[in-house]
Image (cartoon, rainbow, N blue to C red):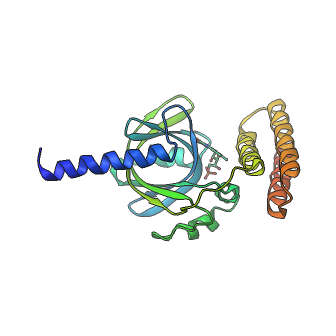
Amino acid sequence: MDLCSIQVEDMTRNLMKILDSLEFSSDTYIETVTLFYVNGKLMGLMPLGMKKLNSQFFARIFKSSRMYNTILNLEDLSRVKCKICISSNPITFYYAIFKKEKLVKAFMGKNYSRKFCDACIDATMTSYEKDQEFLKIYLKPIEIYIVRRYPKGFNRASAAIIEALVHYTKIPFVNMEEQKRLILKIEMCMETVYRSSEKPTYRAIIEEIFKRAKNLLLNS
Ligand SMILES: Cc1cc2nc3c(=O)[nH]c(=O)nc-3n(C[C@H](O)[C@H](O)[C@H](O)COP(=O)(O)O)c2cc1C
């Protein structure tokens, strides 16, 4: 084994150790906001659940997401680069659904905003498999940037907002009965936000998700 391959092995081991301490594992999805670039051009960004399988990331991109067709239409996967953002801020996820342009600014260059990003992992796409409802994608981590050094305490309002967003994104793709069930679930998330936080931003966000969800039902 030459010196160069020893260094690569050491780097990979270190990278895996850091990913383990960020809680990436094979049994639980970590909710990320992932930005996709092709030849350096931003093609899309979305909240995306990620697992770590051996030394790669694994995610499922559902047919309902714009990136599904973008990836299927690509000729050369090696040109796909991703920024995988870990954030404990529910506003990051809210922007990733409703105000994507605000996040694009925050992720320009290597200029990661501490407000929206606790850590960011650069990765390349290595392969994908087509399943019935989704694409299974595999990403190779290249580099990790730890943006926030201090831990943040857990709060139920953040978790409830993220849960409400997940319910919201499913509404356009299910029947009316299921839509009503999802709206009820969002209402329960709203209750949790109101019980656990007086923060005006959190309350405004959950109100907006609830309102938008009801509008989707009315217009479907
Ligand atoms: C926390 C969270 C996790 C999500 N995870 C996934 C996922 O793993 N795969 C997926 O296809 N969509 C997932 N979604 C839904 C998409 O992010 C959502 O539909 C998004 O709007 C797709 O981007 P687009 O509107 O540009 O197509 C998730 C949404 C949230 C809020």
For the C terminus, which image quadrant? Answer: top right
Q: Give how far across and how far down residue 62 sits, in percent.
A: 58, 39
Q: Nearer the viewer, residue 98 or 90?
A: 90
Q: Is residue 10 left or right of residue 125?
A: left
Viewer-nearest residue: 220 or 25: 25
Query: From what the image shows, is residue 218 above or below residue 93?
Result: above
Left/right of residue 98 with respect to residue 122 in the rendered view: right
- Between 192 and 139, which is closer to the camera in this rendering? 192
How many numbered marks appear? 0
Q: Is residue 64 visible?
A: yes
To which quarter of the image does residue 132 belong?
Answer: top right
* Residue 150 drawn at (x, y percent): 58, 60
The quadrant the N terminus occupies is: top left
Q: Indicate the position of residue 113 as horizontal and vertical percent values.
A: 57, 68
Residue 79 appears in which quarter of the rendering?
bottom left
The residue at the point 32 percent across, 45 percent down is: 13
Q: Does residue 140 appear anywhere in the picture?
A: no
Give the x, y percent position of residue 35: 51, 56
Is 145 placed left or right of 177 in the picture? left
Residue at 88% over, 48% down: 195
Q: Residue at x 70, y 59 (%)?
A: 91
Choose between 133 and 156: the one closer to the eye.
156
- Taking the spot 19% from the left edge, 48% from the top edge, the residue there is 6
194 vs 163: above or below:
below
Q: Is residue 199 above or below residue 218?
A: below
